Image: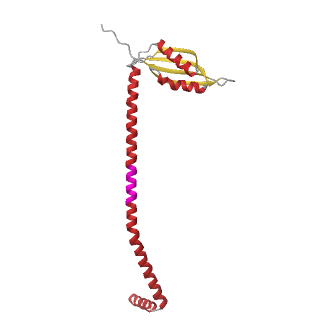
Amino acid sequence: MEILNFKRRLADLRYGARHPWARAGLRAGAAAAALALLALAVWWPAQRERTALEDKIASKRRDLVQAKQADELLGAYARARKDVALLEKKLQNAATQAQLVENFARLARHRGVKIITETYEEGRGAGVHPSLNTELAVQADYPALRDFLRDLSTLPTWSEVQEVRLESVQGAATQKGRIRIVTYRHAPQQAKS
């Protein structure tokens, strides 16, 4: 039964294909298919070339990024090497408390910071480099205090800011504050017995 239905439908299609409009439609469909195949034949190599070019550009970008990162790493290594040499030089400095007082006072005058009180205490650590703990009570406007703190790294000793507490003075544009600084110094040579 199904075979008869299939033959009848095939016969109907053959009969319908004899109509002039059906023939024109088949020709138009064949022409459109031929144009689509022609467009695909032109587009496919161009698309493959474009994809290859995009891959090449991505590869060049990766190479450029890697070269830039390598250059940044080399620069960071050079800066770290220079900073380590500077740190070693600062750690060799056996500054006395009087020298630190003078250094802090000179830096404060240079930046317009008034040191109200200062206390010094020897560090309790048993490390390789003894430390001197300093607490400064200061007064100045905020930019001067900021510059003072920033310029502590220019001192000949390794001085680190441990804590800063600032408060505004009512009716004035100045700040009062306490700054805790730890200075690491060169250990004095022990006399051999």
Q: Residue 42's spot in the image, x, y percent?
A: 40, 71
Span of residues in magenta = 52-62
| Residue at 38%, 26% in the rendered image | 85
Looking at this rendering, what residue extends furthest in the front direction?
110
The part of the image, by quadrant, that contains residue 8 is: bottom left
| Residue at 48%, 17% in the rendered image | 133
The part of the image, by quadrant, that contains residue 123 is: top left
The chief SS type of the magenta part is helix
Q: Is residue 73 above or below residue 107?
A: below
Pick whichever, 66 or 136, lies toward us: 66
Query: Is 184 positioned to the left or the right of 138 in the image?
Result: left
Pick whichever, 6 or 32, lies toward us: 32
* Magenta span contains residue 139: no
Q: How many marks?
A: 0
| Residue at 40%, 65% in the rendered image | 47
Pick whichever, 7 or 50, lies toward us: 50
| Residue at 40%, 62% in the rendered image | 50
Q: Residue 173's spot in the image, x, y percent?
A: 65, 25
Query: Is 32 positioned to the left or the right of 135 in the image?
Result: left
Q: Residue 181's spot in the image, x, y percent?
A: 50, 21
Looking at the rendered image, the quarter that the N terminus falls into is bottom left
Looking at this rendering, what residue extends furthest in the top direction?
193
